[in-house]
Amino acid sequence: MTKPLHQQTVSLNRDELLAGADWYITLSDSAQTLVKRDLIERHVSSGDALGHQGEIQLHWFGVMDGLLKWSVSAIDGRSVTLGGQSVGSWFGEGTLVRGKPRQSDIIALRHSRVAMLPRTTFNWLRQNEPAFNEFLLRQINERMHWFMGSMAAHRLLDAEHLVVRALWGLVHPLLNPLGLRHLLISQEELANLAMVSRQRCNMTLVTLKREGLIELGYGAISIRDVDALAARIR
């Protein structure tokens, strides 16, 4: 029987988001002041888009609350989910660096709050803060390897492994820099990220619970053994 889990706080204000960001704490005092001044906040309702494929992106994003996914849709309505973004993560740097229209949609899987740093400020940091560029290089490299792994997974892995990979993605340091192990995500949301049926997702989660890797609750999943979970997708 599914039981309630202790709910840890995963909602951040702007100061808390910045304090936990590796890139921010390496900036000069003047650059930190600039970022705090220019950072704005946006609420995105469940199912709504933060950004659409084909749009010119004007901001760099940090997740303060909620859960978002990247997806690409075809004309016939089919879609491919590229990954999820949880609280504390920053994303959208690749599109800003390219300076070309977005190639994916960003959709809120639940009501979310997102911090947005204007493109002009983002570019100023790139030009004036070497440590920021080092962060972006590591971030883009990690994201490239994650996407390469995702592409291979959807070609080579079965539904069970896709669910495990989606779950592991939510505790990956790139997507979950706060290191949260108690994830406020429903089975339906996880199935959406994994691109499998809710029934198949549930079967996999029950197996993982039986093996002691996770604990299930109402609208939540707690990871009990991160290393064992990662080993399932290698």
Image (spheres, grey):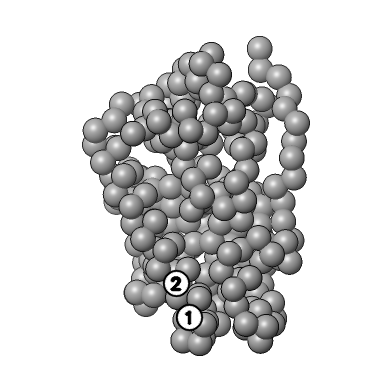
Q: Position of residue 125 (x, y in %)?
A: 52, 82
Label 2, residues with CA under 10 Å away: few <14, some 14-19, many ≥20: few
| Above or below 60: residue 166 | above
- Residue 40: image location, x then y, percent: 66, 72
- Compared to residue 175, the image places residue 97 above or below, namely below
The answer to whether residue 63 is visible is yes
Q: Which residue sits at x=66%, y=25%?
A: 217
Q: Residue at x 54, y 29 (%)?
A: 225
Q: In which image quadrant can residue 26 be found?
A: bottom right
The percent coordinates of residue 52 (x first, y second) are: 44, 62
**Quarter assignment of residue 99:** bottom left
Residue type beneath disc 1 = Pro
> Within 10 angstroms of label 1, few (less than 14), some, or many (20 or more) residues?
few
Q: Residue at x 66, y 17 (%)?
A: 2
Q: Quick one: quadrant of the N terminus?
A: top right
Residue visible at 31% across and 26% down in the picture: 158
Image check: 46 left or right of 168?
right
Amino acid at the residue labelled 2: Glu
Residues marked 1 and 2 touching at CB (< 8 Å): yes
Q: Which residue is mark 1?
A: 130
Percent across and percent down for residue 130 are: 48, 80
Q: Return the residue at label 2.
A: 134
Quick check: 63 left or right of 140? right
13 or 213, which is in the foreground? Answer: 213
